[in-house]
Amino acid sequence: MIEKITALQVVLAVIPILLLIILLGVMKVSGHISALITLIATVLIGIFGFALPFSDTGVAIAYGVVKAMFPILLIILMAIYSYNVQVHTGKIEVIKQQFAAISEDKAVQVLLLTWGFGGLLEGMAGFGTAVAIPAAILISLGFKPIFSAVASLLANSVPTAFGAVGIPVIVLAGEVDMLEQITSISADIVAQLAVLMFLVPFMIVTLSNPTWKAVPKHLLLSFIVGATSLIVQYYAAIYIGAETPAILGSIAAIIVIILFGKIAALKQKQPKKVLPFTKKEQMSAWSVYGLILALVLITSPLFPVSTWLKANVSIFQSTFNFEILGQVKKLGVYWLTDTGVLIFISSVIGGLIQGGTFKGLMKLLGDTAIQIQKTVLTVCCLIALSTIMDVSGMITVLGVALATATGAFYPFFAPAIGAVGTFLTGSDTSSNILFGKLQGSVADQIGADKGWLAAANTTGATGGKIISPQSIAVATTACNEQGKEGLILKKAVIFSLLYIIIAGVIVYLGS
């Protein structure tokens, strides 16, 4: 049964969310200052409003900071570093001209980078790579920084459901005791995201060229890409499971976007561009990203490499233990297969292949660390405050309040709960850990399909990802627009709300 909560608890629990939104979106306070102020307020509310002991509060903050460092900040650092390596060696110019050679159509370029390449990065690595790398490349192609950030955030929605080789769905299935039905839950998630697979690409291409004349072409491109993504992801979910829908769907989308761009160029009788680079130079330009994709895939759950290494080479394992309210919370990092480390290795090896020197690449790493210093403070504060909200019971109070208030209309609001989870934590996986059991419990009480409502948590979480302050911090860092988090939030929030409402309608109609 869902425990009873008081009105005062609800009011106190919602304050950190409202405060963060007001600071970022209304008062236009920079991200790191907003996050720090909200963390202080959350600490006070946790101690005096939810009776969280001082000692446990301190441990929760430390736990949050370590969670922020590994893997989130490490991956953000290395994702930005991988792009900086491309700039340092000059190979980003090769990539720019390759994209321009595929199509001069800005909509095709943006969709290929964000929905296609970004979706592939999300499916394999997650944790900010799908925002940071595409946004940085878009800027190098001449797109404005704020546009690059918003487009990348919008595209990093649907793919996050099966991001990081399906970890969010695998965790969700475990939370609701449905691991044996994981293909069913995966299929439900794809069904709930079906309309959005068409809508999100359309919004992205419309952002890139908002003229009425371009609408027919945008509709056709969005339909082709959406249909391809939907069909591939659905069959991958049914016949393989949660690990591959985002990966295979993104690869298929990349293929059809390139074909669309080539066919459109032929119809417009555009002269075929001859790149002033040899095949070797073109392959070298992709060595960093190619190595990232290869290493992340090889060490993913799809292959036994990672399991074997952890079982036989334990020296590279680090474990951090934090005791909060009598419960020990563990954080484990296996350095040989950690995504951030893999991106670092790929960047260094790729940089050397591209002609860089080891000394120059190490200096560049230090410069990149300085570049993201505000992001470090922002993400550490955000993860720490979400941890305090979790251990103190604030997040549970918010979820229960929404479930209680909505009654029979709960399925419509189920995705909103998942969205709150990602808004607070920045992670689809964390949202499923926080609210997966709640969704299953409510489903049992109202007689709904538990798998369907559990899937709704992830569906909503993908919408909340668009405006997660952590994701926005990644975007501003990649675009070198630190301090403009509030502006990006205001531009992205409309898309996020529309996304969550559509998801709610779909979940309600299907329940």
Image (spheres, rainbow, N blue to C red):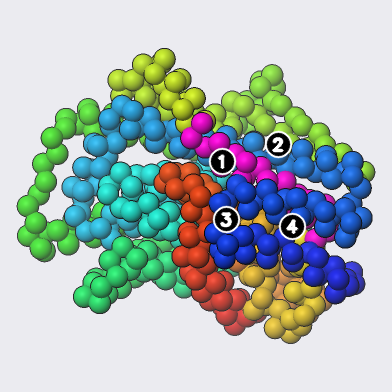
Q: Nearer the viewer, mark 3 or mark 1?
A: 3
Q: Secondary structure at mark 1?
A: helix
Q: Which residue is mark 3?
A: 29
Where is the C terminus found, in terms of image quarters? bottom right
The structure residue drawn at horizontal position 21% and vertical position 75%, both measured from the top left corner, is: 213
Q: Marks 2 and 1, Cα distance to the nearest angstrom? A: 17 Å
Tell me the magenta residue range: 370-394
Residue 436 belongs to magenta span: no
Regarding residue 263, the answer to whether it shows in the image is yes
Task: From this view, report whether residue 455 is shown above or below residue 167.
Answer: below
For this rendering, which residue is in front, 19 or 158? 19
Side of 466 relative to 59 (left or right)? left
Q: Is residue 162 visible?
A: no
Amino acid found under the numbered disc labelled 4: Leu
What residue sits right under mark 2 in the picture?
Answer: 66
- From the viewer's perspective, is residue 130 above or below residue 311? below
Q: Main secondary structure of the magenta part?
A: helix
Q: Give the number of callouts.
A: 4
| The disc label shown at residue 434, or none | 4
Residue sitting at 21 percent across and 42 percent down? 97
Q: Tell me where residue 5 appears, x and y as whole percent.
A: 88, 71
The picture places residue 485, in percent across and down from the top left corner, at 52, 54
